[in-house]
Image (spheres, helix red, strand yellow):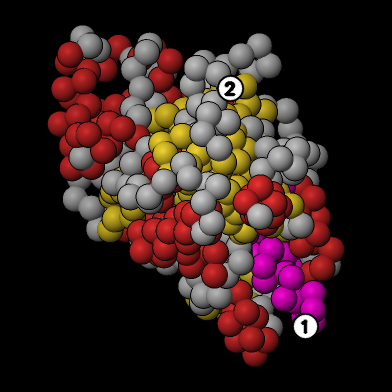
Amino acid sequence: MLLAKITEQVEKLALRTNPQYAITLLGKMPPSVMASLQRRRFRETLKIANRTPFYSKQFRRRNIDIRKISHPAELGDFFTTSDDLKVYGAEAFLAGRPDTVFETTGTTSAVPKHIYFSNSELNQMGRMSALGLYQLGLRREDRVLSAFDVSFWVSPAVVRTAFQYLGCFHAEAGKISPLEFYERAVIYKPTVIFGEPSWLVRLTEIAEKRGIWPVKFIFAGGENIAEDTRSEVERVWNAPFHLNYGQTESFGVIGVECAEHDGYHRNDMNFFFETPESNEDGEGELVYTTLTRNVMPLIRYRSTDVTRMVDERCKCGLFAKRIAKIRGRVDEMIVCGMGNISPWVFAELMNGVPNATDEWQVRIWHENRRDVVDIRVEASGLNVPGVHQKLIDDIRQNMRMRFPDFQKNLDMRLYELRITGVERGSLRTGRKLRRLIALDAPPRETEYADRDALAQDIELVIG
Ligand SMILES: [Zn+2]
């Protein structure tokens, strides 16, 4: 206990010093000391959580005596889910007075989740992020230009705080069109660029045509990127492309890549990570418990992301252990150039479109450096001239009216949208129709992949 207390003081001290010294100091911490620090913080967090309406009720109902719990696994099958946040409301999770809030949209509905924080929590996450960015080479003399979307998104606030600790020059462009960003960035010639992966790919296409300037690295968050696309971006800029992994619920930073690009260095100081339901390869849903949050602590929060814990030391030499690259999502949400998409989005796109049925399927793949979102919907009357085109027009119209954010990404050409009406009864092969399918490569069959080809087929049949 005393050792843990000393460690905590060392950590506090380390984070106040310059990043290089902090990394060295924290790197000297033996694993046993880290483990005892985590347990101490975990017990403290349980006490804080027990003050919230949600956790006190849950613990009581399950006869959990928190005084007897010293490891998250001892909570058995108790977890917190994103549904809990929606059903009970964020207020049921509050243990202290918040200073700020961020939002994140759900995977199964349009209702956003609200996650509250204090300014001191923001500062703490900012300091940890500063260490990660320093390790990647960000220094005081750098000029950062960020295109992170500032609207209710946690990441811009966290990196802004990190920049203060690093003392570098920075400006926030917001998520403006990549072309506008390019034209305005030329003046500042940023040495480091922040943005979402699909947006950065578009910026890179423009830069390839119009010219680059010297860049130290590119930093992305908010979604994943295919490795061949990453290499392409790196080739054009002649600079590394690093990814951050996080969630709004976790206050952004769960882990950050190092130059090795072999998983994310995890933030064990602020989280207790587990993969309690892992398979024989050790892969399972990442579950985390916050260790330093007083406003809205989360106990065993299901991230819905599938990964593996990596405890071997990384080639880069950084003290922090890792989680492997994210394998996929437990639920059906897919993150791509369109945004965070879930089945409900497409149900809403099809809603009210004459001739469209409830039988539809969406396939997503990567082709020519861009995500393709391919909607196939079973429709009636396709042999009548004009019906197929009207089907496509109506769905596109619904997109413009109902999902301005997805339309915005389409206008910026962050992804390609294909819509095809198909014959009744052609999609369902099993009992259940899989709504969203992420493909590793473009589909080989040409049957309905190309709507122009289909339109020609229809014309042939009619004419
Ligand atoms: Zn590393």
Is residue 24 covered in magenta? no
Across and down, in percent, residue 4 comes to: 45, 30
Q: Quadrant of residue 208?
A: bottom right
Q: Secondary structure at mark 1?
A: helix
Report the quarter where the N terminus lies.
top left
Where does label 2 land, which residue?
Answer: 429
Q: Which residues are magenta?
A: 198-226
Residue under the point 48% across and 45% down: 381
Distance CA(mark 2)–CA(mark 1): 47 Å
**Type of the residue with mark 1:** Arg
- The spot of residue 162 in percent (x, y) is 51, 62
Q: Is residue 200 one of those drawn in magenta?
A: yes
Name the residue: 18% across, 24% down: 56
Front residue of this view, candidates 188 and 180: 180
User: Can I make out residue 109 in this image?
Assistant: yes
* Mark linked to residue 210: 1
Residue projecting furthest to the front: 463
Out of 160 and 439, give the one closest to the viewer.
439
**Label 2, residues with CA under 10 Å away: few <14, some 14-19, many ≥20:** few
Q: Quadrant of the C terminus?
A: bottom right
**Residue 444 occupies which quadrant of the picture?**
top right
In the image, 206 versus 244, the foreground residue is 206
What's the amino acid at mark 2?
Thr
* Local crowd size for mark 1, using a 10 Å CA cut-off: few (<14), some (14–19), many (≥20): few
Which tag is nearer the camera, tag 2 or tag 1?
A: 2
Residue 151: % across, % down: 38, 65
